Image (spheres, rainbow, N blue to C red):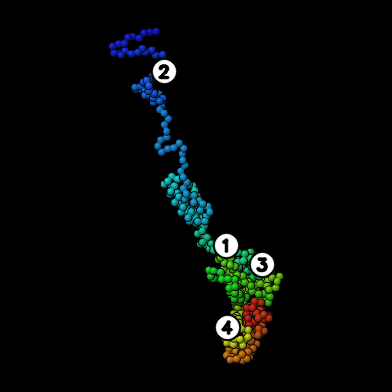
């Protein structure tokens, strides 16, 4: 043990310092004066020129931060764009919302970019599909299908010339929309010979719709079956109209149909005989005959002449005019050699008939009217046309007029004098 030398003149006197042992020395902090609390641990002032050996107390999170990360919100327009794009209900709106959402996401730092992109893509595809459908008329077909399925009592969803079967084999009562189209060469329940659409925004009522269909369908019959003699006597005209329920869905179509009047019996073969089936000579003959048929069809509603003599005189005048027009049409056509003679004979009979109908139109009393009417009607006997019809290859069996019809069972020509 050595004794340190005494302090020199440049060294201050101080307490005894033990020798260094090689162990770490810890700083000594001054004690607090009597009656005062010492400073908290970690806040004692370090000796002059030294740093504290341990860090200060635990520091809280800085300004603008929190202990847990909060995710950015999802953009609402991106969600809407995705929904509309997937549903494809409003593709234009979905596309616009998706593009707007992408801009907002970039500016605001929101989430939902993938949803906005997906919604925009699907909306764009949907918009392109709608444009294609509208350009090709597919939308009209779509709504037509919706209309036909709207009600079981809607009119036929078939076109002119189509033959069909019904579920119960009848054409009476409410006709369901699930009719089955079949080949006209096979047995079938009905054949559509005309269709037309009703007008108006509100349903006119069952009676008005039925009356309209009755008048219109009988008038359209000759356009499909020009030769009434070729229509079997047990075939009648039926019509199917929109119901009040289907009217609300845009159903306005009336279907005019040929059907058999005998229960359990069907049609066989098409009843169509128009320009698409007949030759030019047959069409010329039937066209002239229809002029007279149309005039005869305007007979007054009064059952007896004495109940409406002025009305019957006006009717006789219309028939006189039709006979003149029919004769001109028959003379103007160049007929085949074997048909020329019979047609000329027919024209001569029409001239005689015209003279009698003209006198009936000028009659001043009922008896005189009946006298000329009877003579004029006899000259229009259908049997007088058989020879000309045979030469032209048309039906030669005169129809039955038991019910005052034109031979088709439909009552289309009230006079029963179709030539």
**Distance CA(mark 4)–CA(mark 2):** 140 Å
Can residue 338 be seen here? The reply is no
Q: Which residue shows up at 65% across the image and 81% down it?
A: 404
Number of the label disc, if any, that sits on residue 24 = 2
Residue 281 location, x and y as percent? 61, 79
**Distance CA(mark 3)–CA(mark 2):** 114 Å
Question: Does the CB distance between marks 2 and 1 fall below 8 Å?
Answer: no
- For this rendering, which residue is in front, 220 or 211? 211
Q: Which residue is mark 1?
A: 146
**Distance CA(mark 4)–CA(mark 1):** 47 Å
Q: Which residue is mark 3?
A: 165
- Frontmost of labels 4 and 2 is 2
**Distance CA(mark 2)–CA(mark 1):** 97 Å
Which of the image's four quarters has the N terminus? top left
Q: Earlier in the sequence, mark 4 or mark 1?
A: 1
**Picture quadrant where residue 354 is located:** bottom right
Q: Earlier in the sequence, mark 3 or mark 1?
A: 1
Residue 379 location, x and y as percent? 64, 87
Decide if residue 203 is on the left or right side of residue 395: left
Q: Which residue is mark 4?
A: 329
- The crowding category of the residue bearing disc 4, from other C-alpha atoms within 10 Å (few below 14, some 14 to 19, many at least 20), is some
Question: Does the CB distance between marks 4 and 2 fall below 8 Å?
Answer: no
Q: Secondary structure at mark 3?
A: strand
């Amino acid at each position: 043990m050595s004794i340190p030398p005494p302090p020199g003149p440049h060294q201050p006197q101080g307490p005894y310092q033990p020798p260094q042992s090689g162990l770490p020395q810890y700083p000594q902090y001054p004690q607090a004066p009597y009656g005062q609390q010492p400073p908290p641990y970690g806040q004692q002032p370090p000796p002059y020129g030294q740093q504290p050996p341990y860090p200060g107390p635990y520091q809280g999170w800085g300004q603008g931060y929190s202990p847990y990360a909060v995710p950015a919100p999802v953009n609402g327009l991106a969600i809407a764009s995705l929904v509309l794009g997937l549903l494809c209900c409003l593709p234009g709106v979905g596309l616009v919302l998706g593009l707007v959402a992408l801009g907002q996401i970039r500016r605001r730092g929101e989430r939902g970019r993938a949803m906005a992109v997906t919604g925009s893509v699907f909306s764009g595809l949907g918009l392109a599909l709608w444009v294609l459908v509208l350009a090709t008329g597919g939308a009209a077909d779509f709504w037509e299908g919706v209309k036909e399925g709207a009600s079981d009592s809607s009119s036929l969803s078939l076109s002119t010339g189509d033959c069909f079967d019904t579920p119960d084999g009848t054409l009476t009562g409410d006709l369901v929309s699930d009719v089955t189209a079949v080949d006209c060469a096979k047995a079938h329940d009905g054949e559509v010979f005309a269709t037309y659409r009703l007008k108006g925004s509100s349903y006119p009522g069952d009676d008005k719709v039925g009356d309209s269909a009755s008048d219109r369908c009988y008038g359209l019959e000759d356009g499909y079956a020009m030769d009434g003699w070729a229509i079997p006597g047990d075939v009648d005209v039926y019509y199917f109209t929109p119901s009040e329920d289907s009217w609300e869905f845009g159903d306005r179509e009336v279907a005019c149909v040929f059907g058999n009047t005998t229960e359990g019996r069907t049609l066989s073969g098409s009843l169509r005989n128009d320009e698409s089936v007949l030759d030019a000579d047959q069409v010329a003959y039937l066209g002239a005959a229809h002029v007279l048929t149309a005039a005869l069809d305007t007979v007054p509603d009064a059952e007896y002449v004495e109940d409406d003599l002025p009305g019957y005189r006006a009717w006789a005048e219309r028939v006189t005019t039709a006979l003149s027009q029919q004769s001109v049409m028959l003379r103007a056509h160049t007929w085949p050699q074997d048909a020329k003679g019979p047609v000329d004979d027919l024209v001569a009979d029409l001239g005689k008939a015209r003279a009698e109908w003209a006198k009936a139109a000028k009659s001043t009393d009922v008896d005189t009217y009946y006298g000329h009417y009877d003579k004029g009607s006899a000259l229009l006997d259908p049997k007088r046309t058989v020879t000309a019809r045979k030469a032209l290859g048309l039906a030669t069996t005169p129809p039955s007029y038991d019910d005052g019809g034109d031979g088709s069972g439909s009552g289309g020509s009230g006079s029963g004098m179709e030539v």
